[in-house]
Amino acid sequence: MIPDLEISLLRTFIAVNETGSITSAGRLVGRTQPAITHQIQRLEKAVGKPLFQEDRRHLNLTRDGEMLLGYARTLLSLNDEIRDRFQAPDIVGHVRLGVPDLYAAFLLPAVLSGFARAYPQIEIELRCSRSLPLRAALEREEIDIALMTRQPDSGGTAVRSEPLIWVAARDRPVEAKGPVPLALLPVGSIYRQHALDALGHVGRSWTITAVSDSIAGLQAAVYAGLAISVFPLCALSPHLRRLGRAEGMPDLPTLDIVLQRKTSGVSAAAEHLAQYIVAELGTATI
């Protein structure tokens, strides 16, 4: 009979897989390289199967390792959720969170769901808008915290980096020559500016066929085959395909996502939400 699996062994197993290195995994979980190796050996003995292929220089999972990985992530998530819930102080409050609808749709659902379970007495009011209006709302103290794309002259706590990519409808052809039909956010958007700058740098002509303040509007134009657009990698859905040099599209930069607080300070409830978002999104994988 397989014994109950230890959470610490599963945590190490996930760390080794995600970092691809015994040494890096050791730094991540705070253990020495020999301790990491010993933990993996213990886990393999417990399940009775090799979890990594014999060539340990590349640390590729076996089929059994791939199967265990999904279960391990689920168990670790539940363990951490239970731990956070019972460690959480009984904080009551109302937090006004600002976030672009693109990040709200693709980055925050699981984060906010977990936070709501851990802090059921904190009420979250969500305001969706582009990053520039959110910054202004913070200055007017209309919201408490905001998750935004970093602007050239803005600060904030770094949360994660997102590569920008060109996207088109999965079943629509894209001409490698001629003006590029674009669906973009309005003037002032850093996504829009990077798209036009990149096309200008390679001398590719373009025409704007759709402008929308929302991700839904951009998606509608792209899905209909009217245009291509620029999304962060996290928003790449099964209905879209990524375009690159093969289609004549230039490289795009990687942008930083930051969390900012209103200048006069925030409540304990808002600070707990801010720290939770930074911790969860900073370690999330795509």
Image (spheres, rainbow, N blue to C red):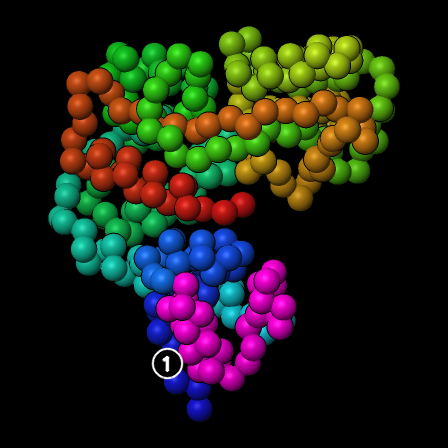
Q: Where is residue 201 in the image (x, y as percent from the top left)?
A: 70, 12
Quarter location, residue 223: top right
Of 220 and 276, nearer the camera is 276
Q: Is residue 223 visible?
A: no
The residue beneath circle 1 is: 4
Q: What stretch is highlighted in magenta?
A: 33-61
- Residue 208: name its quadrant: top right
244 sits left or right of 92 in the view? right
Q: In this view, does 283 lie to the left or right of 247?
A: left
Image quarter of the C terminus: top right
* Residue type beneath disc 1: Asp
Residue at x 84% of width, y 24% of height? 176
Q: Does the magenta stretch include residue 54?
A: yes
- Quadrant of the rendering where the N terminus is positioned: bottom left
Left or right of residue 118: residue 254:
right
Q: In this view, does 164 lie above or below 115?
A: above
The residue at the far bottom in this view is 1
Q: Is residue 173 magenta?
A: no
Q: Where is residue 230 in the image (x, y as percent from the top left)?
A: 63, 25
Residue 51 image position (x, y, % from top left): 55, 72
231 over 38 or under it: above or below: above
Q: Which residue is drawn at 49% across and 78% down?
A: 44
Asked if residue 7 can be seen in this view, the reply is yes
The residue lying at 16 percent from left, 31 percent from top is 267
Where is residue 222? Give x, y as percent.
Answer: 70, 27
Residue appearing at x 18%, y 55% in the figure: 87
